[in-house]
Amino acid sequence: MGIITIPEPVINNPVINTTLSQSYLRSPSGSIPSNAITANITFYVPVFLDGTTFDRIGLRGGTSYSGTGIVRLGIYNASKATFKPTTVYLDAGTVSVTSAANFEITINSTPPAGYYYLAFNCQTAAATTNTYLTHGSDNALTQVFPSLNGTASGYYQESVTVTSGFATAGTLTSVTVAPLVALRIA
């Protein structure tokens, strides 16, 4: 087997959004709508990390969010051969989502430079309106992994019940919309 060369990320990745004195990193997305999310599905969103230390991982409840839901967040390694999510790099635990606001989990992580997937699993859906901010139907994968040249949307999902922690990724389905997960730079 030959040497696999991983391309450098395109210039607009990673996307860094600055809010007041904090900077947040997430995958590229042209639009950020609010969408309903079903429980017991893990979503994976591609991102390139450059060796930066992060102190929070978070999400935002959608504009019409109402009720209480439990969401597990984490980071997965990406396969150098297929660019799909593989093993768990970081299981950050869960956060209780109760409104259209930001919710974060404290972490202390410095992933080595490389390709990863930010993971989101709605373990318990809100009984009323279970919406979250999501990536639009952009082609995120080719923005993060440019060598794939538009062959996939970049977002994956897997139907799986997660109760005590993330496991190695299993049967993946490509999807066009996935929840927005962000990392706060320490």
Image (spheres, rainbow, N blue to C red):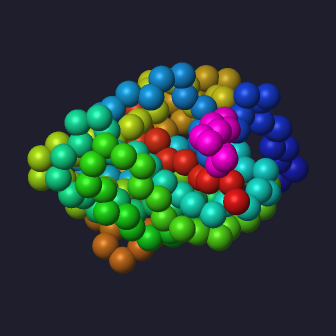
Q: Is residue 2 magenta?
A: no
Q: Is residue 168 visible?
A: no
Q: Residue furthest bottom?
A: 164
Residue 78 locus on image (x, y percent): 64, 53
Task: Classify residue 9 by image quadrant.
Answer: top right
Pick the front one: 63 or 2: 63
Residue drawn at x 60%, y 32% is: 28
The overriding secondary structure of the stretch rendered in magenta is: strand
Residue 143 locus on image (x, y percent): 66, 29
Q: Which residues are magenta?
A: 15-23
Q: Residue furthest left?
A: 128
Residue drawn at x 63%, y 59% is: 77
Q: Is residue 87 above or below residue 154?
A: below
Q: Residue furthest front?
A: 20
Residue drawn at x 38%, y 28% is: 33
Q: Is residue 19 magenta?
A: yes
- Quadrant in which the C terminus is drawn: bottom right
Residue 12 locus on image (x, y percent): 73, 28
Pick the front one: 110 or 88: 110
Task: Classify residue 108 by image quadrant.
Answer: bottom right
Residue drawn at x 71%, y 34% is: 13
Residue 25 locus on image (x, y percent): 64, 45
Q: Is residue 148 left or right of residue 162?
A: right
Pick the front one: 52 or 113: 52
Pick the front one: 117 or 66: 66
- Numbered circles on residues, count: 0
Q: Is residue 162 visible?
A: yes
